[in-house]
Amino acid sequence: MKSYDVIDLAVRNLRESIFRNSLTTIGISVGVASLVAMLSLGIGLQQLASRRLQKSGLFDTIVATSRRDLGNFREQRENGPPRAESPALDEPARKKIEQLPGVIEAYPDIRFVTEVRFDDKPHLTMVAGVPLSAKNNDAFEGMQGGFFSSEAAPEVILQKSFAEELLGKIPNRGADNTSIADLAKPLLGKEVTMRYAERSTSPSSTGSGDAAAGAAYSVVPRQQVLKIVGVTDLDPESMRGAARARVFLPLKLAQELHVMQSSDLRDNSFSATPTYSSLSVRVANPNQVPAVEEALKKMGFAAFSIVDATRSMSQFFAVLDVFLGIFGSLALAVASIGIVNTLVMAILERRREIGIMKAVGASDADVRGLFFAEAGAMGLVGGAVGVALGWTIGRLINFGTNIYLGRQHFPPAQIWSVPPWLVLGAIAFSIVVSLFSGLYPAARAARLDPVQALRYE
Amino acid sequence: MKGEIRSMDGAGPNALAVHTENVCRHFQMGEALVRAVDGISIDIHAGEFVALLGASGSGKSSLLNLVAGLDRPTSGAVIVQGNNLAALSRQQLAKYRLHTVGMVFQSFNLIPSMTLLENVELPPRFAEVDRRERAALARQSLDRVGLSGRLAHRPMELSGGEQQRASLARALINRPKLLLADEPTGNLDSRTGAEIMDLIRSFNQSLGMTVLMVTHELALAEKHARRLVYLTDGRLVNDTPNHDTRNPDTRNPDTRNPDMSDHDLPNVSAVASEPRGETK
């Protein structure tokens, strides 16, 4: 029989017992829908998580530290030079790192805790230097105001929670619905005074290569007036954990101020020249992160990137997707039993018809093909309806979740995603499962003895 | 596969259409062995009209199923046009049923969900005849049995006689050489039955189809068939030419063979003298 004749006959057979076949098809649809809904939520959550990480702007950044600072036993077990031989993370090392392929820039990590006065009230906070290149960082995307006007301008950008603190608002996590624009309005253009401790090298020790001479420096209290140019909502340094900064200075300015940093004490025991506690190494393409990380490790530095964190996250989501997929497929497996049942019932019901077809010349393959086509058609229709249903269920869950998030004063989030491959994959999977379910009934129908079938009344 | 089933084209009027040799069909029914067909040897020539007579359970339908390729013999051979059906694969048997034999049944066996046209179109559909061509063939075939006005009707909307005529149209459509009829008038009143028998006889005569008909109505067989074969308990008990005077084919002294003995072949000159132009 020609394939269009097989399809034609299959469709008319399906239409003949439309009610039962519809129920079976609905069964498949529900199976496919649960599969699609589960997977679309899994994929959506994964995308949400990676979007959040991407927003942090650190996807293309590696934090390089000297192994001297990370003195734990695990480090020693790793390949590479032992701790004592690890090179110092100083200016020549920074230049060398900048020469690595794929690296755009490597800048020192300057951060210190100090006092910032506003309206004559002191506020203790972590301050960090930010390079001008960070302007294009996603982290400053929704910022109010503007970025630093120059590399060393006496300007600051405040993090939202610090802005709230300055204005005397109590930051309330969860129920925080103050808009960033409202916060920025009274602050932009105003000035804050930063009080800090400057580390000034004593003239007697300059030029001396002797390690003990490094200890000779003095700490001078100073203050710097800074203009508030921006307020940012997102946390540009979400990776830092406890060491999060809430006030950002232009990097060059931060360097020129020679603020006493906590790492200075340690560094001096090894080297007289100023070394950096850590460098942020930015690469052109996130794909290059592992290679650059490897190069840094070869140079003797410790390297950490968010890729390390996302790798375990990807693994988690892969496992989650597999689990959601298995639960979704269970419904489809139940539906496939429905197909087997429907087709076996159809054989009993159409026993005589199969006998007639065989008597007038239908081959085993014709009969088998007919039952296969019926299973496949139910799979196709069930798959298509199921995808639509799953899509709707996913949307509803997303909608419901956002209502809940809205009540909790969280921004809405897209926790559901149906990529084209999921649509096509789900329909194809549904057809394959249906055809598989049709194997037994089709074989049984094909082997039916026409004499027996025709005798059957 | 088509080539393996040789057509009867070119076969002379005395060529053997069907030859069975000590054919048996035994069934195991629990402890008992049922010998439905028990060593029947019979030769049927091309163009013959043979009636298989016998009581219920005499094995006539079982023999017909063996010749139809619907069933396989337990032992012995069924040779139709030179092919031993027992040796054919399932697929070859399907091709044989499709191209070489046409069947009509007591219960018509039309597919109730299909219109008459679709029912009749079924064999060419399996033979992969182009859609338009097979619709034309089906119309032609239905026209031949006088049902051209009922193409879109479903079997349930028709009388028994009309259904059997549609079933004849379906048996005819692939132009088989052998028409096998299993009690074709069993569900019909006598007048309608006679119409069906007239149609079958016209196929036998004008199309040169060899007819093997199972019936338990002696009168019907005597009126239409030219050879009567009696079965009892799966065995052939009598094989005789029909001398019935009601039968126009046997009444004519020119077409009768007065010397024909039980197992002799009937005279088929009447068939041979028919114009064969319509046969493929």
Image (cartoon, grey):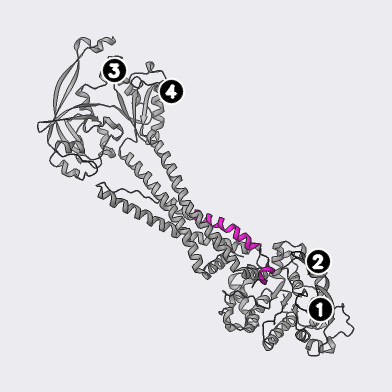
Q: Residues within 10 Å of mark 2 (few under 14, many from 20)?
A: many
| Dots 4 and 3 on the same chain | yes
- Compared to residue A149, the image places residue B82 above or below, namely below
| Dots 1 and 3 on the same chain | no
Separation of marks 4 and 1 at Cα, in angstroms: 99 Å
- Which numbered tag is attached to residue B229? 1
- Which numbered tag is attached to residue A78? 4
Residue type, numbered disc 3: Asp
Where is mark 2, residue-wise?
B77
Separation of marks 2 and 3 at Cα, in angstroms: 104 Å
Quadrant location of the C terminus of chain B in the rendered image: bottom right
Q: Residue furthest right?
A: B259
Magenta span of residues: A429-457
Reading the chain from its start, which is encountered first: label 1 or label 2?
2
Separation of marks 1 and 2 at Cα, in angstroms: 19 Å
Whether the magenta-drawn stretch holds residue A447 is answered as yes
Separation of marks 4 and 2 at Cα, in angstroms: 84 Å
